Image: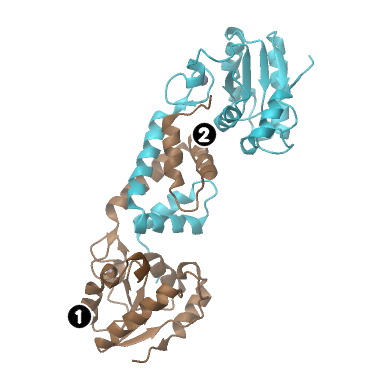
Chain colours: A cyan, B brown
Amino acid sequence: MAYTVPVIEALVQALRQLPGVGPRSARRMAYALLERKRPVMGELASALAHADQVVRHCERCNNLSDAPLCGICQSARRNPKLLCVVETPADVSAIEATGAFDGYYFVLMGHLSPLDGIGPEALHLDRFERLLDEGGFEEVILATNPTVEGEATAHFLADLVQRHGLRATRIAHGVPVGGELEFVDRGTLSSALSGRRAIEP
Amino acid sequence: MAYTVPVIEALVQALRQLPGVGPRSARRMAYALLERKRPVMGELASALAHADQVVRHCERCNNLSDAPLCGICQSARRNPKLLCVVETPADVSAIEATGAFDGYYFVLMGHLSPLDGIGPEALHLDRFERLLDEGGFEEVILATNPTVEGEATAHFLADLVQRHGLRATRIAHGVPVGGELEFVDRGTLSSALSGRRAIEP
Ligand SMILES: [Zn+2]
Ligand SMILES: [Zn+2]
């Protein structure tokens, strides 16, 4: 007897695919939109379609960008001697919000995870090595997550950086072990950056 | 120094307008979509645009529908003597899920709330009265929320129903006082329906 309107069910199913949204809250969202927030539907649909169409990865650093080169790579006002390696664009956003770093970035879009079949070739390391050769950096800060995979990735990259004749540093363990960089508060992230230490060759 | 991509910020702002989504989870959703769930973006955009375009209110009962008459009003297999009045389409969906009711509905799209300037004219009561006159119903179950406004609305409607010579009943107070019908479990809602009592003229 259950009464369903297919187009509403399709909306519920699509909303369920958002992170952190279960079946109950997806249904609640769908009805709230249809009953009381009609203008939001068009606005959100456009924002999704526009972002999907326009946002790509920066050709130099791999960060999310609406242009071939992201705003950071385009900027001449950053410290040209510092490169910071992170796992995701959300990590760039978190570090930028601290105001404690003014160099450039390289975004791996992941971390090494041999068990999941993610080896060095999946992390755009060819592009990373080209950046190390051409970038004129002196220090490469490895700011991968303080997880098992993030640490392993940092050590792998430290070797690579050192083979290119550059100094590799790791953000300090101010960040809680096992946590995700993206969710760390600004103060902690800020001290982790300033307390970074050299990785000995 | 904060680095923002306007098109990503627009997406974050649009996602924030979903119920239950704060600034932090909106940002998390936006990055998850852009980094890992690109196909969901187009799918959700289409589902939103399609539902916004196609879903309207049933001309007879006011429920959400993808046709001029909703599937329930179109059905000849429902009990033609019973009409159930609810506040929202989500309430129809909740009652249908109990399987305890097989009559027709009228959806008020709200409740009386004089303090907010919501009087009888806002609740489509002209259409409701037409349905009472033409519908051939014997009993009208008032299933507005068990809140102060919902109770006041039920009493107002009971008068109206009785003036049209029909029997008015109220769902039993199995539903928790002060709660919202939409979030009541099926069993409670089911007993509330079967335990309904007459409202004496
Ligand atoms: Zn860039
Ligand atoms: Zn209908």
Q: Residue furthest bottom?
A: B200
Of all residues shown, which one is farthest toward the right? A200
State which chain disc 2 sits on: B
In which quadrant is the C terminus of chain B drawn?
bottom left
Q: Position of residue B35 (x, y in %)?
A: 51, 34
| Label 2: which secondary element | helix
Q: Is residue B51 above or below residue B130?
A: above
Amino acid at circle 1 = Glu
Residue at (41%, 71%) from the top-left corner? B96
Dot 1 surroundings within 10 Å: few (below 14), some, or many (20 or more)? few
Q: Nearest the camera: B189 or B157?
A: B157
Camera-nearest residue between A168 and A173 = A173
User: Mark 2 belongs to which amino acid?
Assistant: Glu
Q: Position of residue A92 (x, y in %)?
A: 57, 28
Tell which of A190 and B109 is nearer to you.
A190
Asked whether, in this view, residue A42 is left or right of residue B192, the answer is left
Q: Residues within 10 Å of mark 2 (few under 14, many from 20)?
A: some
Q: Position of residue A167 (x, y in %)?
A: 71, 13
Residue A152: quarter of image: top right
Q: Earlier in the sequence, mark 1 or mark 2?
A: 2
Chain identity of mark 1: B
Residue at image point 79% right, 16% down: A200
In this rendering, the label closer to the viewer, 1 or 2:
1
Q: Is residue B142 visible?
A: no
Say which residue appears at 45% left-offset and 33% top-offset.
Answer: B8
x and y percentages locating residue A182 in the rendered image = 61, 36
**What residue is disc 2 on?**
B35
Disc 1 from disc 2: Cα separation: 56 Å
Q: Which residue in the protein does label 1 denote? A: B134
